[in-house]
Image: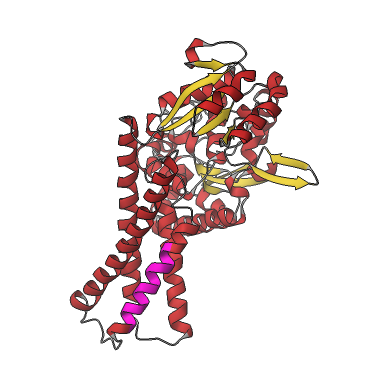
Amino acid sequence: MLQRNQAGLKLINILSDLLIILLSCFFAWRIRFDVLDGINNVNISDLTLVLLTILFSLVNTVLLWEFNIYSPQRLRKAGANTLRIFLANGICALLLMTLLFLFKIMDMPRLLIGISWLVSSALVSVKHMLLHLLLHRMRKKGYNLRHYVLVGNGHLAHQYVENVRNNPFTGICVDGYFSAVEKPELGKCLGRYEDMESVLANTRYDGLVIALESHEVRFMVDVLRVADKEGIPVELIPFFNDYYPSFPTFEKIGSSRLIDLRATPLNRAENAVLKRGFDVVFSFLVLALLSPLMLAVAIGVKISSPGPVIFRQERIGRDRKPFIMYKFRSMRMTGTENTAWSRAEDPRRTKFGSFIRKFSLDELPQFWNVLKGDMSVIGPRPEIPFHVNHFKKEIPRYLVRQQVRPGITGWAQVNGLRGDTSIEDRVRYDIEYIENWTIGFDIRIIFRTLFGAMMNNER
């Protein structure tokens, strides 16, 4: 019954998106031909417009399917699909313009396509967000639930149960668990591992979650055999879960299956190109728009104390390669630049240096580093070789940060970890960013930087 309901909901979701895109195109017609008709005369038949609109809507819906918009959303947050919806619709608009060029349909207004893309993307995104929020609310009230049974009673099992209880919007219910030893805090014990076959034969569940510890791996064969016999979907929490990346990649050599434990979304070529393209465009715009401000800062640095305007320092970048990072000089030259740590109250700072550091204006030349390819707009902050060599010996996974380009700002910085703060916490936030990167994540960090994180707490 649940599977039929899910299939019905997916069909309604797809058809409603198709209808929204069609209506958006007709709305774009009215905007283009009624409101903006005075721009230029358009010679295109209504029949051609109707056929192109239907084609656009159908292809758009297919692309949304290919972008996994209609895959199970139970564990995703509201708004998680917004960027993919805009990208899918944008690709469809580009395909349509290519089609018009190839068939020399030159009278089709490009502005009409642009309005259709913008309106349909916005409305479909809003619909998905509202549907997501509605389903979350229903699940919190006990509707649209999925019933799972857990196998195991150790750290992984407790972690899973706690996460499910803390996220009621998922609609996941753990109806019980199988274990060699009863653990009341996990809920209802359905029996020992050897009791699974008889229990599962008489009760239907939506899925089985295996959370065995490393010393219990010997039970895996029997657990999988019973689950397959009863036709119950199986999900596995690996016993090395705490070392598992958010988006692992898999390879196969013969019968050996390899998991890349350091895989990140930026290992994928399309993501790397998207992030680099965003970096280039964003940094170019910043340098162009803020060039008068940068000139004023440069003059202030020059007259505030003797020394160069631009402070150059070797930092460690992606793949542990050194590069020269640029900043407006905010401190007196003391000879300790390559080893000393910046502190909240640092006597080396000039008065003007304190001002530009307070508002992070000293970081502006780093956008040139971004254009050169040494840095990214968003990423872990780069450190000097002295500190990298020191921290890699004391902090586990410290050098995981070096898998990506360092950034002007980052997830750790917008969470208050800058200057003389905990390195362990910085590394934890940096790795969380690296393993969960999306372009939407970058945009979120930029907004948080602009509206709060640019202010430095140094005194």
The magenta stretch spans residue 39 = no
Magenta segment's dominant SS is helix
Which residue is drawn at the image coordinates 53% and 20% (left, top)? 177
- 174 versus 102 height, above or below: above
Name the residue furthest right. Answer: 254
Which residue is drawn at the image coordinates 63% and 29% (left, top)? 226
Image spot of residue 325 (x, y percent)? 59, 45
Quarter of the view holding residue 119: bottom left
- 203 versus 91 height, above or below: above
| Residue 44 shows in the view | yes
Image spot of residue 36 (x, y percent)? 22, 76
Image spot of residue 245 (x, y percent)? 61, 36
Quarter of the view holding residue 145: top left
Quarter of the view holding residue 261: top right
Taking the image as shown, residue 129 lies to the left or right of residue 185, namely: left
Q: Which residues are magenta?
A: 48-61
